Image (spheres, grey):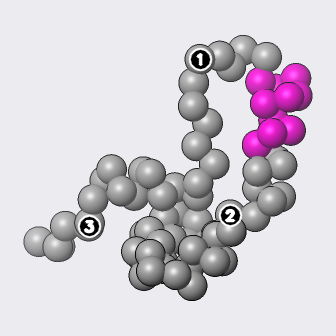
Amino acid sequence: MGQQELAGDSGTAMRAMIDASAAGRLGTPADIAAATAFLLGPDSTFVSGTDLLVDGGVVAALRAGPPSPSA
C-alpha cells in the first residue's frame, strides 16, 4: 500500500517525510511485528495508556519542523 502511495499524487510529500525521518526508510512488516511482539511480551507489562508510534521518526521530524540554518 505504501509503494502505491509513493507512486501516486502524494508520493513527493511522502518521500520528503521519509527523508526527514530518523530511519530514512519505509517501515516493513518486520518493524510492525517487532513492536507488536514488544507490546505482547513481558517487557511491556508496565506500559499503559500511551501511543506507540512505529513510524521511523516521521511524526517527531514533522513536529520539530525544518532544521534551522547554522549560525
Q: Residue at x 44, y 68 (%)?
A: 17
Residue beneath disc 1? 49
Q: Residues within 10 Å of mark 1 (few under 14, many from 20)?
A: few
The residue type indicated by label 2 comes to Gly
Identified at 26% across, 66% down, the residue is: 66
Q: Are marks 1 and 2 in contact (CB under 8 Å)?
A: no
Q: Position of residue 54 (x, y in %)?
A: 63, 48
**Is 18 positioned to the left or the right of 36 in the image?**
left
Q: Residue at x 76, y 51 (%)?
A: 32
Mark pair 3, 2: CA separation: 23 Å
Q: Quadrant of residue 39?
A: top right
Residue bounds of the magenta highlight: 35-44
**Residue 50 highlighted magenta (yes or no):** no
Q: Which residue is depicted at the point 58% across and 58% down? A: 56
Q: Secondary structure at mark 1?
A: loop
Q: Amino acid at mark 3?
A: Pro
The residue wearing badge 3 is 67
Checking the image for residue 27, the label placed there is: 2
Whether residue 19 appears in this view of the structure is no
Along the viewing direction, whichever of 43 and 55 lies nearer the viewer: 55
First reached walking from the N terminus: tag 1 or tag 2: 2
Outermost residue, front side: 9
Q: Measured from the top left, where is residue 65 in percent x and y? A: 27, 59
Image coordinates for residue 4, horizontal then vertical, percent: 63, 77
